[in-house]
Amino acid sequence: MKKSDYTIIENRLLARNTYMMVLRGDSTQFTAPGQFMNVSVEGFYLRRPISVCDWSPSTVTMIYKTVGRGTEKMAALKEGTVLNILTGLGNGYDLSPSGDRPVLIGGGAGIPPLFRLAKELIREGKKPQVILGYNSKDEIFFEDEFIAIGADVTVTTADGSVGIKGFVTDALKQMEGLTYFYACGPIPMLKAICTGTDLDGQLSLEERMGCGFGACMGCTVITASGAKRVCKDGPVFRREELGW
Amino acid sequence: MVNTEVTLSGLMLSNPVIPASGTFGYGREFSELYDLDILGSFSFKGTTKEPRTGNQAPRIAETEGGMLNAVGLQNPGIHEVIDREIPFIREVFHKPVIANISGFSEEEYVYCCSLIDKVPEVGIIEVNISCPNVHNGGMSFGTDPKSAKRVTEAVKRVTTKPVYMKLTPNVTDIASIAKACEEGGADGISLINTLLAMRIDLKKRKPLLANRTGGLSGGAIFPVALRMVYDVYEAVKIPIIGMGGISSAEDVIEMMLAGATAVEIGAANLVDPYASRDIIRQLPFTMKKLGIDSLSEIIGGAHNG
């Protein structure tokens, strides 16, 4: 973990209630896709934990949904604004058990960390299948970006306005020859994935956090090996750890 | 050169700054960030006889100038703490540590304190009779002078270490509770624990925390804590560790003027992991600015005249 200042170089609307922010600053604390950062927003006591979508040696990209007053304030920030951020938080995804044809399953705000994961898997010569789940057409973001890096993308929408009508699990049912899964999204989606497949995999959890670095015990999840902190021991857990 | 030393029950601290129980774990996370030996001491996570996983999530909510927590005393239990956490603390912190002990019965407090009494790394036992997030225990011992006194007496019988009773602000008259603890033989008083509070989710129309209520901490509670330290200082002769929303060197000095001999830093550590370190760094400069040569001379300074 590192605490440092970042300068906003881009902050724009990608889809309904969904923004992309690119920050200039140190990215050396990020070592695995699926890690997150905790962003201090002026006027709010606690930081906002937000997953990292991608990074370069001098920039960090995050995609976030406006879900409350804090993220609404973030959405209104202008280029040049300086943000104090704790970076390199959490464990991130482990690429080693992926096999040749892993499936990456993201729902809504759970999609962004899968982008860096897909990039790294492709770099290793894997052929990731990507399932992106949204509520409707106006919420779709990053489909083109996933396609551009060479991922095989399937889109689902709950209202059927684009792609497969239904949920990510409906797309998953139609796929064959998968070797492993990586998932990020709302808890009901994660549980439905586990109910619907025998594949082994990793799931990134979300919980209300106090500190984001393991001190306050605010975001505990009960696992096969006892109480774990989503922020420090996770956010990524192996399926067997969760027993789902 | 200003003097930041203070003394708690014969224990000399290089400065009065102590990260508060529940915001510092057992020091592991923070030992990776800075040298813990700069601290006056630290109070480790509230420890019970048995391991506890705490309450259901969500356990955290935000509020104006502060936060709510309903963790519910998640901890690995006293035996695990003595076997695994104390040896780690010995590696990273070379001063007496404060052991925060929580419980659900008088027997449990006695059991844990008699074990921790034998741990040489522990300089002070802070007995938490004030956790608002557990049921059938915790705070109920700290809301009645008689039971507060009884727990104090029971714990004092099984340890020779200084015993500080950590009090809840969720009472009508905190000074009477502090006085009862003093009569029971307490060596000092720690105050305040968090204020019982809640938030409601507007969309779900339900309490935001799964536990329904939680404890409010952070800058929002500083004036409440300050007033209570001030009142308790007038009521007892034993030293006070003051806490509640402290986030700057100025807050430290204000709390000491109200009557605290030392202070604990709580929620500030969670929003800025370097908060305690930065307050310690800033303290000599703030003292100079205010014309303070020695911190121990200002304790209770606001009561003069």
Image (cartoon, rainbow, N blue to C red):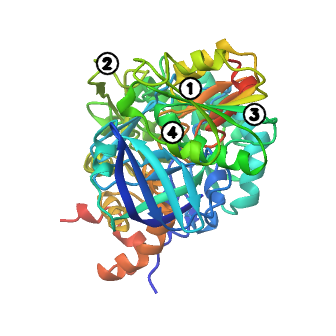
Distance, label 2 to label 3, CA atoms, is 41 Å
Question: Which residue in the protein does label 3 denote?
Answer: B79
Q: Is residue B160 visible?
A: no
Would residue A151 be visible to someone looking at this image?
yes
Q: Secondary structure at mark 1?
A: loop
Which tag, 2 or 1, sits closer to the chain's start? 1
Q: Nearer the viewer, residue B151 or A214?
A: A214
Q: Are marks 2 and 3 on the same chain?
A: yes
Q: Nearer the viewer, residue A209 or B292?
A: A209
Identify the residue under disc 2: B204
Subunit of label 2:
B
Q: Which comes before the other along the chain, label 2 or label 3? A: 3
Residue A182: give x, y in percent of width and height.
Answer: 67, 32
Q: Residue at x 52, y 64 (%)?
A: A59
Identify the disc placed on residue B54. Answer: 1
Tag 3's secondary structure?
helix
- In front: label 1 or label 4: 4
Question: CA gap, disc 1 to disc 3?
Answer: 17 Å
Task: Determine the residue positioned at 59% across, 23% down.
Answer: A190
- Rounded to the nearest angstrom, the CA distance separating label 4 from label 3 is 52 Å
Label 1 neighbour load within 10 Å: few <14, some 14-19, many 20+: some
Distance from label 2 to label 1 (Cα)?
24 Å
Mark 4 near mark 3, Cβ–Cβ under 8 Å? no
Name the residue type under label 2. Lys
Compared to residue A22, the image places residue A161 above or below, namely above
Which residue is tagged 4? A143
The reply to the same-chain question for discs 1 and 4 is no
